[in-house]
């Protein structure tokens, strides 16, 4: 992966803060509208592989969409939950950023700094 993938939703406050921070840092990102370019099943499984908390790190359990679900997510298989998140991307916490090796969910400036700096170091090493 050449750049950082930034899954965003324009009306999300955390997404706007993250976008502003990325812009100020001149970080190169591939911006993807989370609801129009929802991660594929394979991408979602990869994102999950980068989490430390599994589904709980990506699933927005405090959201209205989650609260209005008429299913018991805890009783579902992993593939069923992943499919549900793909079909209903509003269930995902936002923003989601990844360079393919690390994951940042939500606005977290220190985690963003680490992700961007690491990506910049990788590019510098390739140039040398």
Image: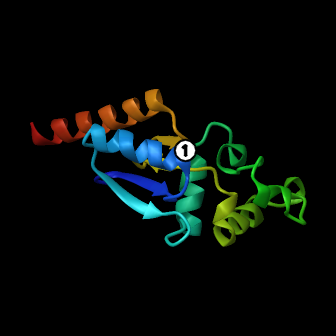
Q: Quadrant of the C terminus?
A: top left
Residue at the spot x=90%, y=66% of the render?
Answer: 70
Check disc 1: other Cα within 10 Å, few if <14, some if 14-19, many if 20+.
Answer: some
- Between 36 and 80, the residue placed more toward the observer is 36
Colouring of the image? rainbow
Residue at the spot x=59%, y=67% of the render?
Answer: 41
- Between 61 and 42, the residue placed more toward the observer is 61
Left or right, residue 72 beside residue 43: right
Left or right, residue 95 beside residue 79: left
Question: Does residue 101 appear in this view?
Answer: no
Q: In this view, which residue lies farthest toward the top?
A: 110
Which image quadrant is residue 44 in? bottom right
Residue at the spot x=84%, y=56% of the render?
Answer: 67
Question: Does residue 44 appear in this view?
Answer: yes
Residue 80 in picture, x, y percent from top left: 76, 66
Left or right, residue 85 beside residue 105: right
Residue 114 in picture, x, y percent from top left: 39, 30
Q: Quadrant of the N terminus?
A: bottom left
Q: Is residue 56 above or below residue 69?
A: above
Which image quadrant is residue 118 in? top left
Residue at the spot x=48%, y=59% of the render?
Answer: 10
In the structure shown, which secondary structural element does the residue marked by tag 1 occupy?
loop
Count numbered badges in the picture: 1
Residue 78 in picture, x, y percent from top left: 75, 58
Q: Mark 1 = which residue? A: 50
Residue 7 in picture, x, y percent from top left: 48, 56
């Amino acid at each position: 992966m050449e750049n950082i993938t930034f899954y965003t939703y324009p009306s999300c406050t955390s997404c706007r803060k993250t976008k502003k921070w990325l812009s100020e840092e001149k970080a190169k990102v591939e911006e993807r509208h989370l609801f129009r370019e929802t991660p594929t099943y394979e991408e979602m499984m990869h994102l999950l592989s980068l989490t430390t908390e599994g589904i709980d790190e990506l699933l927005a359990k405090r959201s209205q969409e989650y609260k209005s679900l008429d299913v018991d997510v805890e009783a579902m298989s992993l593939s069923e939950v992943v499919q549900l998140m793909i079909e209903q991307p509003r269930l995902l916490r936002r923003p989601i950023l990844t360079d393919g090796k690390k994951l940042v969910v939500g606005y977290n400036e220190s985690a963003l700094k680490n992700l961007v700096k690491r990506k910049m170091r990788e590019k510098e090493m390739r140039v040398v």
